Amino acid sequence: MMLHAKELMAWNKKINLTAIKAPLPVAEKHFIDSIAAASFLENEQFLMDIGSGGGFPGIPIKIMNPSLTVVLVDSSRKKVNFLKHVIRLLHLKNIEAIHSRVEDLQKNEPYTNKFDAVVSRAFTELSGFVDLADPFLSKTGKIYAMKGNHADQEITPGILKRYHIETVHYQLPFEKSHRYVIKLSRKS
């Protein structure tokens, strides 16, 4: 993860990968936050990270769970180029970075109904993320939405009607900000 962070900070000087630039906030808000998400996964084998950006949370999750197959998706070509560079540099296996809008990828049959987990960190509001993620889920797949302080306000009646919801709270260690993982599984 240190090598990933070093590359992120070097590339960020040339292209905008993240607004967070200082080493300690990068460590806390990207890596520690991503590792926290990894701890909430169950027995998933195939994970999609939507809006992966600089590789968060997908790459740290992959590092923490080497047997996991991971697909990173981002609509920015420069971010996907960075992701591919980090994947090569770290010699990660069973992980790919795809340059695509999620709406377009939903029409690509090899990716639909395949994933045990679809995760995102601050990609869009919850109802939009759920609608984008759902076509990629296997029958028993789960959606993991990483959110900040107002996570509960994003849970709509429509989401409650379609999904079982579990919300897990954690706190970042240095700035003490509150974070939540909202885990959604389809109702039968």
Image: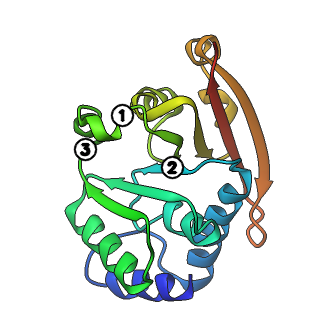
User: On the picture, is 14 further left or further right than 118?
Assistant: left
Q: Give the quarter of the image for residue 66.
A: bottom right
Q: Quadrant of the N terminus?
A: bottom right
Per the model, the C-alpha gap separating discs 2 and 1 is: 12 Å
Q: Earlier in the sequence, mark 3 or mark 1?
A: 3
Please give the label number shown on residue 95.
none
Q: Earlier in the sequence, mark 2 or mark 3?
A: 2
Q: Give neighbour class at mark 3: few <14, some 14-19, many 20+ (Cα, 10 Å).
A: some
Q: Earlier in the sequence, mark 2 or mark 1?
A: 2
Q: Give neighbour class at mark 1: few <14, some 14-19, many 20+ (Cα, 10 Å).
A: some
**Image coordinates for residue 162, horizontal then vertical, percent:** 59, 14
Which residue does the numbered mark 2 point to in the structure image? Answer: 46
**Image coordinates for residue 128, horizontal then vertical, percent:** 43, 29
Per the model, the C-alpha gap separating discs 3 and 1 is: 14 Å
Please give the label number shown on residue 112.
1
Residue type of the residue flagged with mark 2: Phe
- In what element is the residue under mark 1? loop
**Image coordinates for residue 26, horizontal then vertical, percent:** 56, 76
- In what element is the residue under mark 2? strand
Dots 3, 1 in contact, CB < 8 A: no
Q: Count the marks.
A: 3
Judging depth in this view, the residue of 6 and 64 nearest the camera is 64
Q: Establish if 17 lies above or below 5.
A: above
Name the residue at 28% across, 65% down.
80
User: On the picture, is 100 further left or further right than 180?
Assistant: left
Judging depth in this view, the residue of 111 and 176 nearest the camera is 111
Residue type of the residue flagged with mark 1: Thr
Name the residue at 63% across, 27% down.
185
Name the residue at 41% across, 64% down.
95
Residue type of the residue flagged with mark 3: Arg
Which residue does the numbered mark 3 point to in the structure image? Answer: 101
